[in-house]
Each structure stands twice: as C-alpha cells, then as structure tokens.
Image (tube, rainbow, N blue to C red):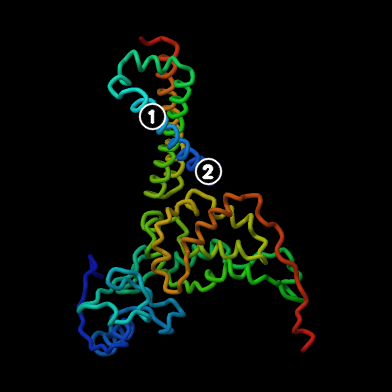
C-alpha cells in the first residue's frame, strides 16, 4: 500500500464520442490490468462510475473526452469517501446514511400492505412536487461535492436529505413525525448551508439543495404536518382481469 | 432544545441584530456627530435614558445569542462525537450567559449612576 496517493499517467487513443469510462476500459484492457474503478451500465443509470474528472465530480460514462478540452485528463476518487483502491471508494457509509432516513413509504394500514386491494392515488400536482427526486441514482456525486460533508461525518448528506423530502412530500406516506425527528438534530438538515454544489454536479438534473431547503420548511411547519396518508382506491384494472 | 428551535432563534436574532445595529449606528454616528457620541458624559447620558439603555441591553443579548450559537454550529461541524457535542452545547450556552451577565453589569452600573 502506498503511504501517499500518487498519480499514474497513461496514454490511450480516443475518438470524438469516446467517454472517459471507455478510455479507462482501454487502459485496463491494454495497458494496466491492475487499475481499479467501478462501472456497470455505461448509460448513467446505475451511478457506479462516479469520480472526480478534472477536479469535478462526474460520471465517467457520460463524460466525453472531447468535452474536457485539452490533453491530459485527471481522474481522482470522489471526495468525502474513504478510498478502497485507485478510483474505488467505500460507499457503505453513504448507503447507511440513506437507509437511516427511512427511504420508503411508511403506512399504518398493514393489512392493506400485506394484501393490496387497490391503489393509493396521487394528483399530477402532487407527483410534480416530488418526481425529480425519484430520478436519484445514488451515485454519490452530490455527497462528494458537499462542503459540509467534508467536515461533518455525521451529516446525512444531500442525497439522503433530498430523499427524505421526497418521501415526506409523498401524499401516500404517513411517517412525517418520525421523519422530522430524524433530521431535526445537531447534525441534521440544519447543517446544510446551501452551497448548492450538490445540485450543480447531479448527473440526473436533480436539485438536492432545493429538496433540503423545502425539508427545512417542513421541519419549521412542525406539528402542522399531515398525519394521514392517502386512502386506498379500488384498482380499476382489476375489472379487466 | 430541538435544533429547529435554535435555528428559529438564530434567524430571529439575525434579523433583530440587523435592525438594532442600524438604530445604534444611526444614533451614534448620524444623529449625533461621531466624535461627540464617544464623549464620556454623552455616553453616560445615553445609558441613563431608559429607552436607549433598553435598546443597548437588547442589542447585547441579541448579538451574543446569535454569535455564540453561530460558534456552536461551526464547532459542531468541525468535530463530531457525543462528548464534544455536549461540551460545545453547554460551553457556548455558558459563555453566552456569562457575557450577557458581564455586559448587563455595565449597563446597570451606568444606568443607576454607580459610574460617573
């Protein structure tokens, strides 16, 4: 193991449409088989290939070599994560923080949950208020860019907080009180100082900074939060079955 | 105390401090010439006016509460841990109260005529 991280230089050919991920695969297949990086879908869906490209957190699969303009491209592992090896970072704390904020619908009608008889409906307006946050692919780029996350290891981070807002805003959810308690803490939602870097680097166009600000508004509203989730409506498709 | 309550306090004191500092600067640097405003007897006269002394006391409390809560936030983001959090929370509360007490002592002494 190296005492201090260092850069290794590789030279590979690239075409106009080549992505940084393709260049990395060229390095791995032809030059250095030992180089380590994470990747899977190659189409910005899985969020595996997050890394710092020329100093900015990006997905390697959607960053073209030609758009970076200039000779050498500098690749580094994402900030605010422990490095496992080369460009691979330990995402376990990131997913743990996400899981700790109840990323799923909380319902009291357990009987309906066990044997669904219908659907929970929501209006287009209700969907519009949260739909952008459902596009999150959990790549970790927002948390990597967050200045608070750089110093506060207990800060849930923009990804987890934006998801918390997504479920709080969902009319089908009934866990508002628990959710608010989880983020209204010393190292909770208030430690966000609205730098906005999370939104600037999100590869899916999600605006976590907005989610966090709206989450703060929910916390301020406190007891005025909705207690009951939307009712069950009979599934109209059942008649066709 | 919940963090949201402390943040409400932080926002409220920020707004109040803005108004009070503006009033203070207006009284000390605009309505009265700056050199004159700092003369010993003139300063004492300010303290002996109930309205002015109350404004100064309010400014003292508001600025200290805002400043030390801000310091608390910075320290909590600097390091983490249960013991550290507890020390920072109680430490900044203690310093806020101590400084308010010390500042209030000055206001009271000047207002009651124990000075000058």
| Residue A187 in the image, given as x and y percentages of width and height | 47, 51
Frontmost of labels 2 and 1 is: 1
Q: Residue furthest right?
A: A239
Image quarter in which the C terminus of chain B is found: top left
Secondary structure, mark 2, is: helix
Pick the residue in front: A142 or B47: B47
Mark 2 neighbour class, 10 Å CA radius: few under 14, some 14 to 19, many 20 or more: few
Closer to the N terminus: mark 2 or mark 1? Answer: 2
Chain that bears disc 2: B
Residue A124 horizontal/vertical position (percent): 64, 72
Vertical relation: A239 (above or below) B36: below
* Mark 1, residue position: B26
Residue in front for this viewpoint, A34 or A10: A10
Q: Residue at x 29, y 71 (%)?
A: A76
- The quadrant the N terminus of chain B occupies is top right
Q: Is residue A87 left or right of residue A45?
A: left
Dot 1 falls on which chain? Answer: B
| Circle 2 residue | B8
Quarter of the image where one finds residue B115: top left
Q: Secondary structure at mark 1?
A: helix
* Residue B62 pos. (x, y %): 46, 33
């Amino acid at each position: 193991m190296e005492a201090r991280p260092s850069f290794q230089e590789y030279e590979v050919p690239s075409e106009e449409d080549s992505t940084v991920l393709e260049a990395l695969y060229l390095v791995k297949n032809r030059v250095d088989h030992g180089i380590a990086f994470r990747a899977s879908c190659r189409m910005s869906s899985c969020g595996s290939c997050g890394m710092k490209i020329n100093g900015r957190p990006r997905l390697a699969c959607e960053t073209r070599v030609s758009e970076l303009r200039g000779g050498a491209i500098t690749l580094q592992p994402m900030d605010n994560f422990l490095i496992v090896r080369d460009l691979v970072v330990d995402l376990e704390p990131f997913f743990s923080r996400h899981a700790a904020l109840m990323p799923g619908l909380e319902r009291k009608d357990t009987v309906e949950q066990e044997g669904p008889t219908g659907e929970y409906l929501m209006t287009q307006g209700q969907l519009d208020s949260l739909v952008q946050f459902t596009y999150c692919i959990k790549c970790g780029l927002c948390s990597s860019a967050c200045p608070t996350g750089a110093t506060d290891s207990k800060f849930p981070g923009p990804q987890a907080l934006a998801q918390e807002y997504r479920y709080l805003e969902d009319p089908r959810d009934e866990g508002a009180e628990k959710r608010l308690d989880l983020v209204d803490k010393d190292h909770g939602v208030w430690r966000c100082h609205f730098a906005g870097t999370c939104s600037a680097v999100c590869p899916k166009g999600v605006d976590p900074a907005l989610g966090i600000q709206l989450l703060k508004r929910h916390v301020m509203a406190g007891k005025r939060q909705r207690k009951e989730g939307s009712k069950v409506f009979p599934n109209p498709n059942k008649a066709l079955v | 105390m919940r963090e949201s309550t402390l943040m409400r306090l932080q926002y409220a004191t920020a707004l109040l401090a803005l108004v009070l500092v503006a009033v203070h600067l207006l009284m000390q640097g605009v309505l009265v010439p700056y050199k004159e405003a700092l003369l010993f007897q003139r300063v004492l006269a300010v303290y002996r006016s109930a309205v002015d002394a109350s404004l100064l006391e309010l400014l003292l409390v508001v600025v200290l509460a805002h400043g030390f809560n801000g310091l608390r936030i910075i320290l909590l983001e600097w390091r983490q841990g249960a013991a550290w959090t507890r020390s920072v929370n109680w430490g900044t509360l203690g310093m806020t109260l101590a400084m308010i007490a010390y500042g209030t002592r000055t206001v009271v002494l000047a207002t009651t005529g124990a000075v000058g």
